[in-house]
Image: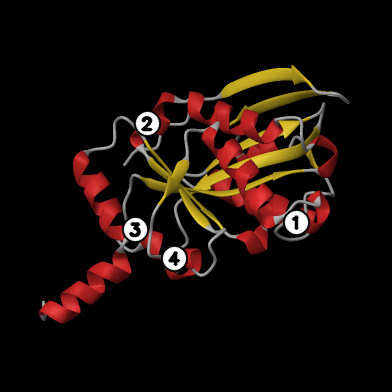
Amino acid sequence: MEHIKNYYKMQRETSTDTIVIEGPLTTTELQQYHFHDKLTAFRPAHKQFEAIQKIADFPEGRIIVARTQDTIIGYVTYVYPDPLERWSEFNMQDLIELGAIEIIPQFRGEKVASNLLEISMRDEFMENYIIISTEYYWHWDLEGTNLSIWNYRKIMEKVMAAGGLLPAPTDDPEIISHPANCLMVRIGKNVPEESVKKFDELRFLSKNKNRSFREGL
């Protein structure tokens, strides 16, 4: 599958600064900016900056950033699912994962995350993908936001809806291990029915495997 990436950009005012939201960016373009030292949700900031630069080099990888003049204050990543996850089981070329979305505390509540997703989906080529996001409550900044698990979940659903991702059922063991966890999905209008059926099987992989075992297939 040839992954076509079309660049989009928007500028908007927040209560504290003017920000630019743009992407997908290449590694070379990312290296023109500083990575804010508060972007530490997944690993130390300098390590996370290295990680998103690697993703930008992948054929399917997409990095959309929010920045002030020359400092990245938020980002979202799209990449193929990790080979160790169930979502890579069928090696689907048209299934990508929203792997991470992060905004520094200063700009939370400014709809920056929603804008990142909106810009992501302006690229018509995104209609060729099934896009998933696996939401686990243990990754959420409950302490920093002072929100309950359920209020955080509501906010996450609202943010994801800005990109067209909606909750979808699954029997994935990690997701069903807590009722606040969820699978978010967006199916592009150009995704073939065959891929949709494969994805449905993937969502209920445990059930299908158990059925095959019982039936001796």
Q: Which mark is residue 203?
A: 3
Q: Secondary structure at mark 4?
A: loop
Q: Which amino acid, mark 3?
A: Arg
Q: Secondary structure at mark 1?
A: helix
Crowding at dot 1, Cα within 10 Å, few <14 / some 14-19 / many 20+, comes out as some
Q: Earlier in the sequence, mark 3 or mark 1?
A: 1
- Judge by depth and name the residue closer to the eye, 136 or 27: 136
**Which mark is in front, 3 or 2?**
3
Report how far apart the C-alphas of labels 3 and 1 lie in the structure: 27 Å
Contact (Cβ within 8 Å) of mark 4 with mark 1: no
Residue at 31% x, 62% y is 204
Q: Where residue 82 appears, x then y in whole percent? A: 47, 61
Marks 4 and 3 sit apart, C-alpha to C-alpha, by 12 Å
Question: Residue 14, located in which quarter of the rendered image?
Answer: top right
Quadrant occupied by the N terminus: top left
Mark 4 vs mark 1: give the one in front.
1
Does residue 67 appear anywhere in the picture? yes
> Which badge, 2 or 1, comes first in the chain's sequence?
2
Amino acid type, label 1: Leu
Reading the image, the residue beneath label 4 is 85
Mark 3 or mark 1, whichever is nearer to me: 1
> Tag 1 or tag 4, which sits nearer the N-term?
4
Q: Nearer the viewer, mark 2 or mark 1?
A: 1
The residue that disc 2 covers is 127
The answer to which image quadrant residue 94 occupies is top left
Q: Secondary structure at mark 3?
A: helix
Kindly check if marks 4 and 3 are in contact, taking CB atoms under 8 A apart as contact: no
